[in-house]
Image (tube, grey):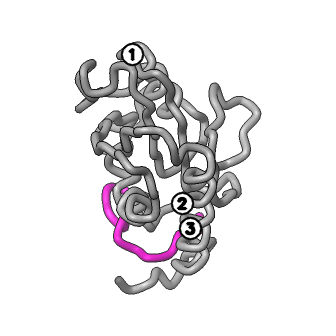
Amino acid sequence: MISPITDRCLYTYEDIISSINNLANQINAKTKTKEMVFAPVMTGSLVFAGHLLPLLNHKVLHINYLHYSRYIDNNGIENGLWIHKPRRDEVLNKHVLLIDDILDEGKTLYECVSTLKRLGAKTVTSCVLFYKPNTKAKIDADFKGLELPNLYVYGFGLDSNSIDRNHRNLYAKNS
């Protein structure tokens, strides 16, 4: 993918991969003896999840996913839309590792954690690749990767108007 010329690169692919390795080490140290359900939130975390999954050393690791969107036609909506969530029997009494791309206001993470708990998950441990420090967030992630300024970002799975997810680096839009 050709790099955007006008936008600022916040993190290179190498920076991101290093952070994913660090997150995997932290997750393995804390949860390695547990049977886990690996559950990325679609669609933004797809690239992150694909890099993280082979680094986890759990003996038993099930894969599922959640698809919850707070956008329709690139317009933010207050109450998100559930497209897919696991069945109750898929998470009941299980440890779930929830994977998301970015923690900004915390609305998506809060909704996903709450839903998994209502479905009967024994524990929900959350991991985000990128985060924006925000004192107004409803929730914090258990594992956090790279800190971001309060700018619109895209690349490495995060979109800009439903495109640009395939950039290797993470960029900030120039206004």
Indicate the position of residue 150 as horizontal and vertical percent values. 68, 52
Q: Label 1 amino acid?
A: Gly
Residue 82 rendering spot, x and y as whole percentages: 29, 27
- Residue lying farthest right? 135
Report helix, strand or loop for mark 2: strand
Q: Nearer the viewer, residue 52 or 69?
A: 52
* Quarter of the picture holding the N terminus: bottom left
Separation of marks 1 and 2 at Cα, in angstroms: 34 Å
Instruction: Please tell me which of labels 2 and 3 falls first in the chain.
Output: 3
Q: CA distance from mark 1 to mark 3?
A: 30 Å
Callout 2: 10 Å neighbours few (<14), some, many (20+)? many
Name the mark nearer the viewer: 1 or 2: 1
Q: Residue at x 31, y 56 (%)?
A: 162
> Quarter of the image containing the C terminus?
bottom right
Which comes before the other along the chain, label 1 or label 2? 1
Q: Main secondary structure of the magenta part?
A: loop
Tell me the residue at 32%/49% (across/down): 43
Any mark on residue 120, and which? 1
Identity of the amino acid at label 3? Asn
Q: Is residue 70 above or below residue 79?
A: below
Residue 12 visible, this angle: yes
The label shown at residue 153 is 2
In x, y percent, where is residue 48?
43, 60
Which region of the structure is painted magenta?
160-175
Residue marked by disc 3: 21
| Residue for point 48% across, 26% down | 113
Q: Secondary structure at mark 3?
A: helix
Residue type beneath disc 2: Val
**Mark 2 to mark 3 CA distance (whole Å):** 21 Å
Mark 3 packing: few (<14 Cα in 10 Å), some, or many (20+)?
A: some
The tag on residue 168 is none
Answer with left or right where residue 71 lies relative to residue 108: left
